[in-house]
Image (cartoon, rainbow, N blue to C red):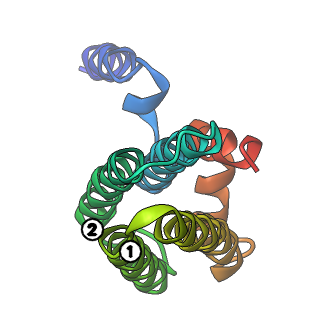
Amino acid sequence: MRLVCAALLGVLMLAGCGSKKESASPAVAWADSFCSAATTWKDSVTSAADSLKQGNISKDSLTKAANDVEDATHTFSKNVKKLGAPPTNAGDQAKQQVDDLSQQIDDGMTKIQDAVKGASGITGALNAVSVASSTLASMVSDVSSTYSELQKLDPQGELTKAIDQSESCQKLRGNG
């Protein structure tokens, strides 16, 4: 009987082996999802901003860049809201940090949309680019600050370890 139990245990353990994502703890999976969403958003926003730096500033290029940022922002907000709280001791605090970030990002998006909608002529377009650039910089800073705050919530705890173990968080750290 013991041999059968040991054999079953061995089979179950082997069946549990797979990709890193499958075997990741729930906290690492949460951190990975958050950092993946943040990295995707940051890359999309950077791409939209870069399109305006090429010098072809018009109402259409502003609108397209704003729409790209809006799409990325809605996707980010939706994805991080779905995460809920990470399964850690600091989970509720982390959820509040992420909810606050989502609101900050949404508010920034509204500011950009208002500037682009109000743009008229060359001066209006340049003003909208200025507002969009400074707002985007602030939004990116908000993401970086939230990432740092998440690590500080429980310095020796599960969330910090999960962030350290997450491949997506390592990529986000690498993006600066």
Q: Residue 81 shows which numbered tag?
A: 2
Residue beneath the point at 49% across and 53% down: 38
Dot 1: few (<14), some (14–19), or many (≥20) neighbours within 10 Å?
many
Q: Which residue is mark 1?
A: 102
Q: Using the image, determine if residue 100 lies above or below residue 9.
A: below
Q: Using the image, determine if residue 72 lies above or below residue 110.
A: above
Dot 2: few (<14), some (14–19), or many (≥20) neighbours within 10 Å?
some
Q: Using the image, determine if residue 30 lies above or below residue 1.
A: below
Q: Secondary structure at mark 1?
A: helix
State the quadrant of the N terminus.
top left
Front label number (1 vs 2): 1
Q: Quadrant of residue 50?
A: top right
Residue beneath the point at 60% across and 64% down: 133
**Residue 99 position within the rendered picture, expressed as x and y whole percent measured from the top left:** 37, 80
Disc on the earlier residue, 1 or 2: 2
Q: Amino acid at mark 2?
A: Lys
Q: Quadrant of residue 7?
A: top left
